[in-house]
């Protein structure tokens, strides 16, 4: 007989108790907003007190989760609806950027509030950049005064490094550009940025985010010209920015010119075609003759693989440069252009050690080919030369310069002796003035 009692049925599975800390808190920006606005109301317009309140509140409130709400309040006074408007029934505060006075000093004080807050809570850095990008897209929803204050604040924060210049991408929004909002905002922004730093610091920041060549995109396509940009910003009191953009455009045009020149030379295009192209580019991009002659010299010297032996490279250089003399002569119509070329030759011969003894030969060749004239050579010798290789090059040029000073007496003698250059004798130039030995 079985005396065992039958087992009672049991429920299968396990029961877990959810810990309170693991329960997900409901997303409630309105409650967060009320806490912040109440605190700001108590601090009043004392921005030092505001900064202390925000610092202390970060330990109690979830800034990480409600970063957008926090920055909306500090800038606009309350949570912003899409488009940049504040709801009529929404709680708001006057302790914010948009309700403050429209002057640089006040915006500098507000910038300190943001600086202290983000230094204290580093995780807010990304959220703040996203907020500013959003605010820039909402510019049309703000009043002119609000846009001006935001522009000044943004310029200050860009200057002190709180913001990265990449936020300016929002200004290239098609609608903002079309209605002129972007350009007007940029005027106030760059004024405060340059006031805090200078145009060189601004240029560095723009270059880091590849924005240095995009400023003309603040205008519609039919107005994207250096002339229009320069006129607009110069009249607004930002001449240094106008000059910076003009210079950037010129740098781009010079690079393009050099690239095209090298291609034309490698193809062996006729000099008359090259000269015509270069003159058109000079006119179109406002490039000076001095700049052009330096580009041509650089292009001419980069088309050859030079001999590494010093005794052979001079002969190679004379033969090569004689060929390109007509091209260089077309762009040395001014004394300053000739001096620029002389300095470029000096720099090249110094930087490329195999050319150290070729300097005088090149100068005399260009004198004979009417690329260089007496006055610029004498000026270079007297006081316009570079420090690079100065003693070597001045010594090389000594005899030739002495002859130039007495050109009227010795012109006939030089004419017969330098004629040897055209006979194909590579040592002729050195023989003329007794420099070196052959």
Image (cartoon, grey):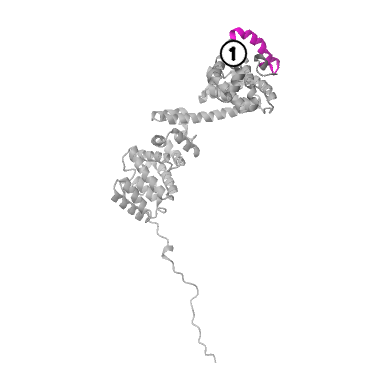
Q: Is residue 8 above or below residue 55?
A: below
Left/right of residue 111 with respect to residue 438 in the rendered view: left
316, 293: nearer the viewer:
316
Residue found 53% across the figure and 19% down from its top: 383
* Residue 194 x/y as whole percent: 41, 34
Left/right of residue 31 with respect to residue 368 in the rendered view: left
* Residue 231 x/y as whole percent: 42, 28
Residue found 63% across the figure and 26% down from its top: 301
* Residue 319 x/y as whole percent: 68, 21
Q: Is residue 90 above or below residue 189?
A: below
Magenta stretch, residue numbers: 407-429
Residue at the disc numbered 1: 402
- Say which quarter of the image contains residue 18: bottom left
From where the camera sits, is residue 378 visible?
Answer: yes
Left/right of residue 223 with respect to residue 348 in the rendered view: left
Main secondary structure found in the magenta portion: helix
Inspect the magenta stretch and tell me whether residue 213 lies in it. no
Secondary structure type for disc 1? helix
């Amino acid at each position: 007989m079985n005396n065992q009692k039958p087992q009672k049925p049991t429920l299968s599975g396990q029961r877990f108790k959810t810990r309170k800390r693991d329960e997900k808190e409901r997303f409630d920006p309105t409650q967060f907003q009320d806490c912040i606005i109440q605190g700001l109301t108590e601090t009043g317009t004392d921005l030092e007190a505001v900064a202390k309140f925000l610092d202390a509140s970060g330990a109690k409130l979830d800034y990480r989760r409600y970063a957008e709400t926090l920055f909306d309040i500090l800038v606009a006074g309350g949570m912003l609806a899409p488009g940049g408007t504040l709801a009529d029934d929404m709680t708001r505060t006057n302790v914010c950027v948009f309700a403050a006075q429209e002057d640089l000093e006040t915006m500098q004080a507000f910038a300190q509030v943001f600086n202290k807050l983000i230094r204290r809570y580093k995780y807010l850095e990304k959220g703040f950049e996203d907020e500013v990008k959003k605010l820039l897209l909402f510019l049309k929803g703000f009043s002119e005064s609000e846009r001006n204050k935001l522009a000044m604040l943004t310029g200050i924060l860009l200057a002190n490094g709180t913001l990265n210049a990449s936020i300016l991408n929002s200004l290239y929004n098609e609608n903002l550009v079309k209605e002129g909002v972007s350009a007007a905002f940029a005027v106030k922004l760059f004024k405060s940025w340059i006031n805090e730093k200078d145009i060189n610091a601004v240029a560095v920041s723009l270059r880091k985010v590849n924005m240095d060549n995009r400023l003309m995109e603040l205008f519609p396509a039919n107005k994207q010209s250096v002339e229009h940009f320069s006129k607009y910003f110069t009249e607004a009191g930002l001449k240094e920015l106008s000059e910076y953009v003009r210079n950037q455009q010129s740098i781009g045009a010079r690079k393009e010119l050099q690239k095209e020149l090298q291609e034309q030379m490698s193809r062996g295009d006729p000099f008359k075609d090259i000269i015509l192209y270069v003159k058109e580019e000079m006119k179109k991009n406002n490039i000076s003759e001095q700049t052009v002659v330096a580009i041509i010299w650089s292009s001419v010297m980069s088309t050859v693989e030079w001999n590494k032996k010093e005794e052979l490279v001079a002969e190679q250089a004379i033969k090569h440069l004689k060929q390109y003399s007509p091209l260089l002569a077309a762009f040395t119509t001014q004394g300053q252009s000739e001096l620029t070329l002389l300095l470029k030759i000096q720099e090249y011969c110094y930087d490329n050690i195999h050319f150290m003894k070729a300097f005088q030969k090149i100068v005399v060749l260009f004198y004979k080919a009417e690329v260089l004239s007496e006055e610029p050579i004498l000026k270079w010798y007297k006081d316009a030369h570079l420090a690079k290789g100065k003693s070597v090059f001045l010594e090389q040029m000594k005899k030739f310069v002495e002859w130039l000073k007495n050109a009227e007496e010795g012109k006939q003698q030089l004419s017969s002796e330098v004629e040897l250059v055209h006979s194909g004798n590579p040592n002729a130039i050195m023989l003329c003035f007794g420099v070196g030995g052959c």
